Image (tube, helix red, strand yellow):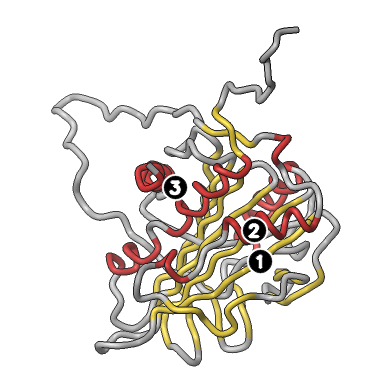
C-alpha cells in the first residue's frame, strides 16, 4: 500500500520533468530572512516523447486542475519544539531515500539550532532559528565516485513552523530569492548558477498532494568536484511543515541516472508526513459517535 502511495505522490511532485531540494523565509522579510536550502542538489529532465500528437486541426487540451486528496489536520500539527523534533525524526529518511548506493555524507546532519540564510550578496550563511520555526534538520548524502563517474551529492530537509501561514511565507520567500539571486554561493568554492524557479499551488500542475510545490533548477559548480553539473531542488508544504530535497550531479552522471536517484526521496517523506498530520479532504476530523 505504501509503495502505491509513493508512486502516486511521485506523479504529483515530479512536475515539469525536474526535481529539487529546501529553503525557508521569515514572514514579509524577503531575501535574507532565513532559508534552509541544502548545499547540494541535482537535476532531472523529462524523457522525450510519450505525448500524443494532436490531430490535424485540433487543439491541445489544457491540463485539468486536480483536487487535493489530503489536507493537514490542525489538531495534529506539532505545538512544541519537542513535538516538532520528534516529527522530523519520523519523517526524514536515511541514505536509502536515494537508493542502495547512497551513503551518509560528512557531516551527516546539520546543527538543528541553526539554518541557512541567503544574504543580500547572494551568499548563504548559517544563523540561529527565528521565532516562527519550531525545529529543522538537514541530512546530507552522497553517491560515491566509481566506475569513471564522479560523486553525486544529495540532501533532505524537514522544517516545522509554528503555523501553516509561517510555512507559506517560507515558500513565498524562496521565489523572491530566486528572482533576486540567479547565482548563489553555497559556501566558499561552491556556487549555484543559471537558477530558474516555478511554483504550483494545490490542484495546479498535477500537485494534488501538498499545499504548495516549488521547483528550482540550474547548475552546481564546485572548486573541488568540478562542474557545472545539473542541479535541482524541490520543496513541498503541508500545513506547518516544509520538506525539501536537492541533488547535485557529478562527472559522467547522466540525467536519467540522477532521476533514478532522486525520484522517490521527496514523495517518500511526503507520504510519511501525511500519515502523521494529514486527513482526507472533506474529513472534518470531528468524532460524531454517540450523537449530540
Q: Give the residue drawn at x 44%, y 78%.
A: 103
Q: Quadrant of the N terminus?
A: top left
Mark 3 packing: few (<14 Cα in 10 Å), some, or many (20+)?
A: many
Q: How crowded is mark 2: few (under 14 residues within 10 Å), some or many (20 or more)?
A: many
State which tag comes first along the sequence, 3 or 1: 3
Q: What element carries label 1?
A: strand
Q: Where is residue 133 in the image (x, y as percent from the top left)?
A: 78, 57
Q: Residue furthest left?
A: 56
At x 50%, y 79%, the residue is 104
- In screen coordinates, is 236 left or right of 170? left
Between discs 1 and 2, the one toward the N terminus:
2
Depth check, mark 3 against mark 1: the one in front is 1
Q: Report the residue that reaches farthest toward the right.
A: 131
The single residue placed furthest to the front in the displayed view is 290
Q: In which quarter of the image is residue 64?
A: top left
Check residue 137 in the rendering and tell me which mark sits there, or answer none.
1
Check whether the beta carbons of the residues at disc 3 and disc 2 lie within 8 A of each other: no
Q: Answer yes or no: do the residues labelled 3 and 1 have beta carbons within 8 Å?
A: no
Mark sitting on residue 257? none
Amino acid at each position: 500500500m505504501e509503495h502505491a502511495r509513493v508512486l502516486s505522490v511521485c506523479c504529483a511532485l515530479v512536475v515539469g520533468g525536474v526535481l529539487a531540494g529546501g529553503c525557508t523565509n521569515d514572514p514579509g522579510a524577503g531575501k535574507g530572512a532565513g532559508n534552509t536550502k541544502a548545499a547540494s542538489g541535482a537535476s532531472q529532465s523529462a524523457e522525450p516523447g510519450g505525448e500524443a500528437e494532436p490531430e490535424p486541426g485540433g487543439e491541445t487540451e489544457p491540463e485539468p486542475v486536480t483536487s487535493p486528496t489530503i489536507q493537514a489536520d490542525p489538531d495534529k500539527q506539532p505545538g512544541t519544539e519537542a513535538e516538532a523534533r520528534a516529527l522530523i525524526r519520523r519523517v526524514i529518511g536515511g541514505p536509502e531515500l536515494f537508493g542502495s548506493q547512497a551513503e551518509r555524507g560528512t557531516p551527516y546532519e546539520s546543527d538543528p539550532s541553526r539554518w541557512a540564510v541567503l544574504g543580500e550578496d547572494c551568499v548563504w550563511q548559517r544563523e540561529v532559528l527565528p521565532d516562527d520555526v519550531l525545529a529543522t534538520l538537514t541530512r546530507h548524502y552522497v553517491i560515491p565516485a566509481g566506475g569513471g563517474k564522479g560523486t553525486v551529492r544529495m540532501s533532505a530537509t524537514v522544517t516545522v513552523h509554528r503555523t501553516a501561514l509561517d510555512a507559506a511565507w517560507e515558500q513565498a520567500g524562496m521565489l523572491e530569492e530566486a528572482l533576486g539571486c540567479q547565482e548563489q554561493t553555497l559556501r566558499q568554492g561552491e556556487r549555484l548558477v543559471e537558477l530558474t524557479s516555478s511554483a504550483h499551488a494545490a490542484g495546479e500542475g498535477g500537485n494534488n498532494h501538498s499545499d504548495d510545490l516549488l521547483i528550482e533548477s540550474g547548475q552546481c559548480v564546485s572548486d573541488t568536484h568540478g562542474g557545472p553539473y545539473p542541479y535541482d531542488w524541490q520543496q513541498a508544504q503541508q500545513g506547518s511543515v516544509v520538506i525539501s530535497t536537492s541533488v547535485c550531479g557529478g562527472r559522467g552522471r547522466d540525467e536519467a541516472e540522477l532521476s533514478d536517484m532522486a525520484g522517490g526521496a521527496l514523495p517518500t517523506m511526503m507520504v510519511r508526513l501525511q500519515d502523521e498530520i494529514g486527513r482526507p479532504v472533506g474529513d472534518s476530523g470531528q468524532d460524531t459517535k454517540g450523537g449530540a
